Image (cartoon, rainbow, N blue to C red):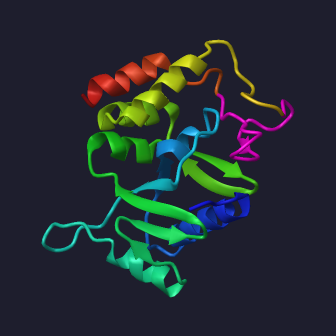
Amino acid sequence: MTAGMEDTLKTLKIINQMMQDGVVGKYAIGGAIGALFYLEAVSTQDIDVFISFQMTPNGTITLGPIYEYLDKLGYKPKKEYVSIAGWWVQFLPADDPLSNEALEQARETEVKGVKIRVMTAEHLIAIALRTGRLKNFARIEQFIQHYNPVATQTISANVAAPKSAITDFKSETIVLSYGKMFDEVRLLDILRRHN
């Protein structure tokens, strides 16, 4: 599935509308798309959306309300994904202490005027480490290679753009920079608590 910026914005707006309509609670973008807010663009085919699921009376998690809501908008599930405006979106449970903390501590930012919640760099690294796939280790290596203890304004062009903005996932990625790519002390604390 190939999605452009307009598709991306539409997908993010739909996820926000789901939150406003009470279909999902707070959410946080994770995975490769979440990492785009800190690193250079990488190829990905899906958006990982971490949410807190409501349990059914028998203690299981259901995607039923999400699928029903999206079905009314014309978006159909396929395996573990839902195709929304050109993106495969996977709704993942924040059902363990690490992903729940990542959800709660996600940072709000904007993509071309659309507010979204993105996991912190430290939580993205910790979850990638726990997941343990080769592509996750490659992402961790990217974070380490881009780590700079000196204030980082951008990793691309557009020095004048606001720190909380991202203008284009493919070319002019503006880093959500809070002095450095990630806080090593905070990362070690997260890893100690969630090991």
Residue 172 drawn in magenta: yes
Position of the C terminus, as image quadrant, is top left
Q: Residue at x 38, y 19 (%)?
A: 188
Res 78 → quadrant: bottom left
Q: Is residue 136 left or right of residue 165?
A: left
Asked whether the viewer can see residue 106, the reply is no
Q: Nearer the viewer, residue 155 or 137?
A: 137
From the viewer's perspective, is 122 left or right of 178? left
Residue 154 seen by the camera:
yes
Looking at the rendered image, the quarter that the N terminus falls into is bottom right
Name, please, the residue furthest toward the top. 150
Q: Quadrant of residue 99?
A: top left
Estimate the x, y position of residue 102 in percent, counting from the top left: 41, 42
Query: Farthest residue in the bottom direction?
Result: 72
Horizontal side of residue 56 vs 46, given as left or right: left
Residue 74 place in picture, x, y as percent? 53, 84
Q: Is residue 31 above or below residue 179?
A: below
- The stretch in magenta equals 158-177
Q: Residue at x 37, y 33 (%)?
A: 134
Residue 17, placed above or below residue 103:
below
Q: Residue at x 64, y 60 (%)?
A: 3
Residue 49 on image: x %, y %: 46, 56
Q: Magenta stretch mostly in which secondary structure?
A: loop
Q: Is residue 145 above or below residue 136?
A: above
Q: Residue at x 53, y 25 (%)?
A: 143
**Residue at the outermost left position:** 58
In the picture as drawn, the residue positioned furthest to the front comes out as 1
